[in-house]
Image (cartoon, grey):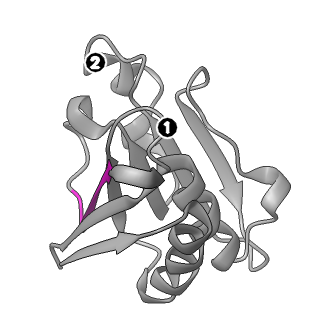
Amino acid sequence: MVITFTSVEELRNWGQTLAKDLGERDVVFLKGPLGAGKTTLVSAMATACGVAEEEVSSPTFALHNHMLNREGKSLHHLDGYRIEDPLEYEQIGLDMLPLGLTFVEWPEKCELLKPTMVIDIAVGENDERIVCLSSLK
């Protein structure tokens, strides 16, 4: 499915709606260039899943952010932008994380996880966001 959004706010609203279809075992891969809106989309989905908005931030330097929603369920936000070797994910204990909904930005080097959904965001003319959504469930 391909959807075009005319603003980042529309993308955010869509993310909040999309989150209703996500389960605690889902792994969402987010692809796209810098500034496309990957972290914005993760923020929208995480807050819709019950995580406080101030807890959602880009894990670019930390590689992994662990959050809990209002029900105490885990959400994971991974960022592979700075990953040079897929073994770095093993070094942070990715295989030992508690069960939870997982978002992965820059997933190209995250070989340990298999996505249930892939969201590819491109930036179009006039700041449009063109999103290609693939559900692998």
| Spot occupied by residue 91 in the image (x, y as percentages of width and height) | 41, 19
What amino acid is found at the position of numbered circle 2 in the picture? Leu
Question: Element at badge 2?
Answer: helix
What amino acid is found at the position of numbered circle 1 in the picture? Gly
Q: Using residue 46 as the reference point, say whether residue 6 is left or right of it.
A: left
Per the image, is 120 magenta?
Answer: yes
Compute the Cα span from label 2 to label 1.
Answer: 26 Å
Are the residues tagged 2 and 1 within 8 Å (C-beta)? no
Q: Using residue 86 as the reference point, say whether residue 36 is left or right of it.
A: right
| Spot occupied by residue 7 in the image (x, y as percentages of width and height) | 54, 65
Q: Is residue 86 above or below residue 113?
A: above
Disc 1 target residue = 35
Quadrant containing the N terminus is bottom left
Mark 2 vs mark 1: which is more N-terminal? 1
Q: Which residues are magenta?
A: 115-123
Disc 2 target residue = 87
Q: Using residue 4 as the reference point, say whether residue 72 is left or right of it.
A: right
